[in-house]
Image: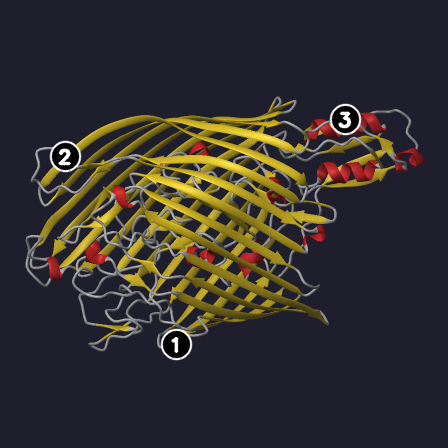
Amino acid sequence: MAFALVWSLGASSAAVAQRKSLDIPAGPIERSIQELARQSGVSIGTNLALPALRTRAIHRRLPVSAALAELLQGTGLLAVRVGPDLWRIDRPRPKIVWRSRVLPPEETVGSADQVDILVTGTKHREPLASTATPLTIVSPAMLSVLGQTPDTRDFASLVNGLSVTNLGPGRNRLFIRGVADSPFDGFGQSSVSVQLDEARLTYDAPDPDLRLVDMAQVELLKGPQGPLYGTGALGGVYRLVPAKPDLAHTAGMAEGSVSATQGGSAAGAFDGMINVPIVPDRLGIRLVGYRIGQAGWIDTAAGARDINHGQTSGGRLTVRTRPGGDWIVDLQGVTQSSSVADSQYVEAPHTLTRAARLKEPQDTGISLVSVAATGSIGAARITAAGSLAWQELSATYDASAKAAALGGTAPAGYHDMRQYRVATGEVRALLSRGALDGLVGASVLSAATDAGGTLVGATSLPVLQVRRRVEEVAVFGEGTWHLTPTLRASTGVRVFRSAVDDDRTEQLNEAVISRAVVRASPSATIAWQIHPRFLVFARYASALRPGGIDATDGTSAETSTYEADELQAYDLGLRWSSPGDRLMLDLGGFVTNWAHVQADVLGPQGLLSTRNAGDATNQGVDLTARWHPGAHWTVSAGTLLQHARIDPASAPALAADRRLPVIPDLSAHGEATYALERNGWTFLVTTRASFVGATRLSFDPALDRVSEPITLLATSLSAGRAAWQWRVSADNLLNSRADSFAFGNPFSVSASSQHTPVRPRTIALSVRRTF
């Protein structure tokens, strides 16, 4: 057993039912339950690993049942009375609902009458209602409204603050809450840290766009996360939490669908999951696989149709074991590959046809292996994790317009081939002593980037080579002082050394630099838990990205470099829910100061480089609301109003438009769901709407073009009976052809108008079976 508490004080059944005068201080949950057993004279036992949560103090008269329910609130565990003076702490048997993914017990929290969301991205499990940081958690039920196998762009339509470019699967850049530099897929480090559980997927690579299949939840941490996640988390963290093996029950799911895009082609998709306990309660596996077709919708003037058709396939295998005590070890392997036959831009707005060009195929892929172990050593809760991710990108562009500038002759294509590797390791410990909770840890990161660009025409001509090696070591810590039962203050810091070796050869001109920096990223938070359902907090945090080599033109004896950029953010937040969660509000205001903004810019030859664009600020208000007006209805909505601008004094040469690229001043979304049960059938009708305001493309005055606002509507109808579910959906109901966050071809964008229309109206039908 994880712990066993037994006191033989002769308490009678009648005495147990009476109210007890309790004086239990706030503290670790295990110690609080031990104190309850001592004061009430009952026996309380469990064979489960209790989460590393801190309970609130109890100083009043309560029955044992009510006291246990209060202590277990936010854990996902129940107290079951199994004898006159004996209680057992257990998990509720998971209820499998056809319209949502199965949420494994380890990722579920709540008391007997309530289920809460458990935040894990802060590196210690805590209920969302008491998490003092700006974030959004999307549950499996919320993801299910997006249909089968949603991607990152689909996820962005459900949350405030996440912007995604539209270059294609595995090539998009992510931006969170105004921290955006350009839509170009250059070599600057990402401003968003993309995580899968404890594993870091990217350093300077684009988002791999892992499909959100069989997820326990998806977490979006907003604002700089340098103290916990290190460099490259200026905007925040996009964290995927896959469902873990259930060690007690065998389960499975299979789903297939067909879709048709207006003015385009048809496509099919399949995904499946199987969960098998190998040794009950000790060892189990969970296997996920999927293959998703993409219908084409772009034509050429020469008569080629649906040229941007493609497919994505992938899978995930997770092995979970409980070797002893409360230790849990997860071994995970992930793979995904995507291919698109041609790019998806056009030259005129509101059209789906472009001039004939050389084909521009794109292929991307990612593989990951990771291991994580969590358990207790003495009073400390230990987590040790390691991961290795490989990512590849291959893209071809028609470079005929720049062939002469690159030393070749037209017609010619430019083949861009990139390989990325990220290895990480981390050990951390959670400790509690009295009114102090502490987190301490150490981490290492090793990242490698190898990229080459070749002009392919009558002959092959090497044009660009980039080689980058990054080594980072860090120690970090966070301490929380519980000043009163309702007021707490936290401070954190990460001290790190980042060493970067950059080697860039551009048209035979080579530049090499090696630099190392030792810096610290601090944070501070004060939180007032006015009520278990009402939290107010203020937060300060920071993050940094190292510098590197700018373009190499051979005209200067000194290597051109760009400096590190750093972001500091100040947040005020409020999180509130009414009894029974009938109404929930999440409101935040923020101010960010961004120094020495790193931006990818397009050179005269069509090659990308990174430069410091100046200093920027952003102020905004972020509001999300969720309402249950009745037994059948659920309505949610969110809006983000922000003002992200470059400081004129720091960048006087830029255009009069000072907006940061890609970021709208206003964005909003809303969802309404109606559920009905009749004669063994369950029906679900969902309607969604999203709005993204006008944006600009680039800092560069020559590319300073504006994308119009985008309004998208979608609806779906699901019908389920027993283990079967049928679903019909329609996306982009208005058949909008608005321009999304992308440009198209870097070798011709400066000389022509380029637009990337959103996917036209698409109708899909799917069938799902659970086992």
Q: Mark 3 points at which residue?
A: 35
Callout 3–callout 2 Cβ contact below 8 Å:
no
- Give the amino acid type for the residue marked by disc 1 in the picture: Gln
- Give the amino acid type for the residue marked by disc 2 in the picture: Thr
Task: Give SS at disc 2.
Answer: loop
Mark toward the start of the polypeptide (1 vs 2):
1
Q: Is 517 situated above or below 342?
A: above
Q: Residues within 10 Å of mark 2 (few under 14, many from 20)?
A: some
Q: Is 6 situated above or below 77?
A: above
Q: Which mark is residue 406?
A: none
The quarter of the image holding the N terminus is: top right
Q: Residue 559 carries which label?
A: 2
Residue at 44% x, 55% y is 211
Q: Residue furthest front?
A: 649
Q: Name the residue under label 1.
A: 262
Mark toward the start of the polypeptide (1 vs 3):
3
